[in-house]
Image: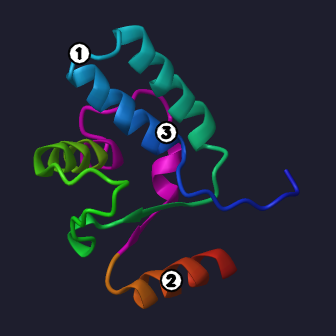
Amino acid sequence: KDENWILDRCILDGYVFTRWLREQGSVEKWVLDYACCLLSMLGERLDYIFYTEPDDIPIEDDGERSVNVEFRNDIIKIYEEVINNSASTPGRDTWRDRIVRLSGSVDERMDTIKSTILK
């Protein structure tokens, strides 16, 4: 609509984590199918999806994020498969064209965000 929003999580994150949960046997298939439909539907409403390259973010025990390397690698693998459209989601999925990869230092990533939004 006419409002601007910046969110620290989006429907792509929801799908990725739901897919991981499905792979662990923690949710039923219909839950993943539902998340997939939401990603296809809501993803197209987003202007940009910023994805921070994981190599630039070290694992740190901050009391919030998991420090489990296997979990992190599983999540990264799913993100890359979904973003690159290999065995991921059906449908048009034009939201993939809106993904902006962020890399480098915090300042470099912020410069990319600012320049993308100001286009």
Q: Residues within 10 Å of mark 2 (few under 14, many from 20)?
A: some
Asked if the residue under mark 2 is in contact with the one under mark 1, i.e. CB atoms within 8 Å, the reply is: no
The image's mark for residue 95 is none
Q: Badge 2 is on which residue? A: 110
Give the CA separation, mark 1 to mark 2. 37 Å
The amino acid at mark 2 is Met
Tell me: residue 62, above or below residue 80: below
Q: Residues within 10 Å of mark 1 (few under 14, many from 20)?
A: few
Question: What residue appears at the point 46 percent right and 37 percent down from the top-left corner?
Answer: 14
| Magenta span contains residue 95 | yes
Question: What residue appears at the point 52 percent right and 34 percent down from the top-left corner?
Answer: 39
Tell which tag, 1 or 2, sits nearer the viewer: 1
Where, quadrant-wise, is the C terminus in this rendering? Answer: bottom right
Q: Badge 3 is on which residue? A: 93
Where on the picture, by quarter, is residue 62?
A: bottom left
Determine if residue 65 is in view.
Answer: yes
Q: Badge 1 is on which residue? A: 25
Where on the picture, by quarter, is residue 16?
A: top left
Q: Earlier in the sequence, mark 3 or mark 2?
A: 3
Where is residue 44? Give x, y as percent: 61, 43
Tell me: residue 84, above or below residue 37: below
* Callout 2 secondary element: helix
| 96 sits to left or right of 75 | right
Give the magenta-colored segment's residue range.
Answer: 80-102
